[in-house]
Image: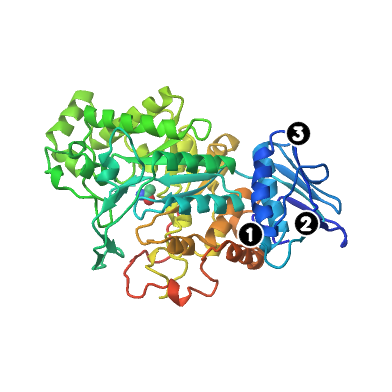
Amino acid sequence: MDLIPAPRLVRTAPRGEDFVLNAGTSLDAGPGTEGTARWLRGALGGAFGVDLAPGAGGIVLRVDGGLDAEAYRLDVGPERVEIAGGDAAGVFWGAQTLRQLAGERAFRRAPVGGREARLPAVAIEDAPRFGWRGFMLDVARHFMPKDVVLRYLDLLAAHKLNVLHLHLTDDQGWRIEIKRYPRLTEVGAWRTGTKVGLRESTRFDDRPHGGYYTQDDIREIVAYAAERHIRVVPEIDVPGHSQAAIAAYPELGNTDVIDTTTLPVLTTWGVNPNVLAPTDSTLRFYEGVLEEVLDLFPADVSPFVHIGGDECPKEQWRDSKTAQARIEELGLRDEDELQSWFIGHFDRWLTERGRRLIGWDEILEGGLAPGAAVSSWRGYAGGIAAARAGHDVVMCPEQHVYLDHRQDGGPDEPIPIGWVRSQEDVYRFEPVPAQLAEEGARLTRRVLGAQANLWTEALDTVRAVDYQTFPRLAAFAEVVWSDLPAPALRDHDGFAARMTAHRARLDALGVEYRPPGGPHPWQRRPGVVGRLKEGPPPIV
Ligand code: ACM
């Protein structure tokens, strides 16, 4: 059956007991399963040209309070397919497995080769390992139109992933409409050109690049995700990575250090010294931004709001009389503590509104705000320190699960970046490092889960995004969903064999993954310089 991610328990039945899905198949949706019924009618209805009309028997969906949240049981017999989920999400994940059982044609939008599918008789019991199974898409460096985001939500759902972290703001673009600050998108949502490639690259494309999501686009994305039991976590990155906002509203920058009125939306890459000024007016401005963000991302969808906090160079704060006066007035030791104060302000502000702050692991420097959770990206160390201090953690170490990093060491990888991280490397990623596991369940529970992150400096189209993301996101999905053994004991050969069937599903979906033998000629970017890290990644 080649299911990905692998279920916990699969019992197969004798041959000849298959279930035949066809125009006569009815759908019996119990209370709480209406969303999954809608989704099944859309997906299987399209693929096989069937109505799945309401009626007894056929496909039966129900919530069974005796199962855990997100867990499901799927029973396929000759007369009936029954999905019982511990909650509505469990039923939905069961439906994703059902689609895989229906074969690769179930991943097309219209019938190919007949209006019937045979599902093998099987009994499956399944439940996820982690509650946070995430993917981060950077829509700031290269804007991804709304349709791309909706398509990725479908792809996440197909892999039982349940968090989409949207990196909405950065130096190179601001991607979310904020009604009270229209210049954030009028000015901040586009740039005049783009550096092509990284570091030593001398190529430049002087074609304007931009785009943003209107508030209704965001509402649609959030609702589309919720229908698929996916939480969308918005990221508004402060106090670094903010030049697009400063270009729109120069008073947000360190005006006593540089002339911020001359700063454009950045057209190049890298860590950038032009950061927010640590002033009351900057805090008030971002409170205004976040008020609209909270309205667009309701707490029942995601209590978490990501406020970035990464890579904030402190030179301008060192040179700024205003920043230094603030340090003195607050009795702080240095600029790191000033950043901590800045993040702490938004931790309190979000907590007062019933929300939770999450930020990159730099928010540990200078002291972690009391309610904050940490995205551990520079390795495991930040996550370990945060868990020990009683904070929740999402593991996303760049050494393992940064999908912008190259998939092979050969010369054909398009704009190669970072360390070589193959499908097998990702398959052997372990979200709970041994140091935490040894300290017991109390600390292990602090690891909410893990996230694969995709930065898009070198990814200017959805085709390039597909190439970097797949097949590795399928391996990541199995790591965070399935009950895999320790990394060295994982059966990557078995996974790779199942990937043959899974690639046919991705083909049917139109996903332009990296082929096992390397890129197609049209997937290469000859001559465009990337930024390599050599050797095996240090495990930190
Ligand atoms: C990051 O990669 N700067 C979070």
Q: Residues within 10 Å of mark 2 (few under 14, many from 20)?
A: many
Q: Earlier in the sequence, mark 2 or mark 3?
A: 2
Q: Is residue 34 left or right of residue 455?
A: right
Is the CB of mark 2 within 8 Å of ligand 1? no
User: Which residue carries the number 1 mark?
Assistant: 107
Q: Is residue 249 left or right of residue 74?
A: left
In this rendering, the answer to whether 2 lies above or below 7 is below
User: Which residue carries the number 2 mark?
Assistant: 22
- Nearest the camera: 272 or 247? 247
Locate residue 493, reporting x and y percent.
64, 67
Quadrant in the picture for residue 229: top right
Locate residue 175, reporting x and y percent.
35, 46
The three-letter code of the residue at mark 3 reads Gly
Residue occupying the point 42% across, 31% down = 294
Q: Quadrant of the N terminus?
A: bottom right
Indicate the secondary structure of the residue bearing disc 3: loop
Quadrant in the picture for residue 209: bottom left
> Taking the image as drawn, is residue 191 in sight?
yes
User: Which residue carries the number 3 mark?
Assistant: 66
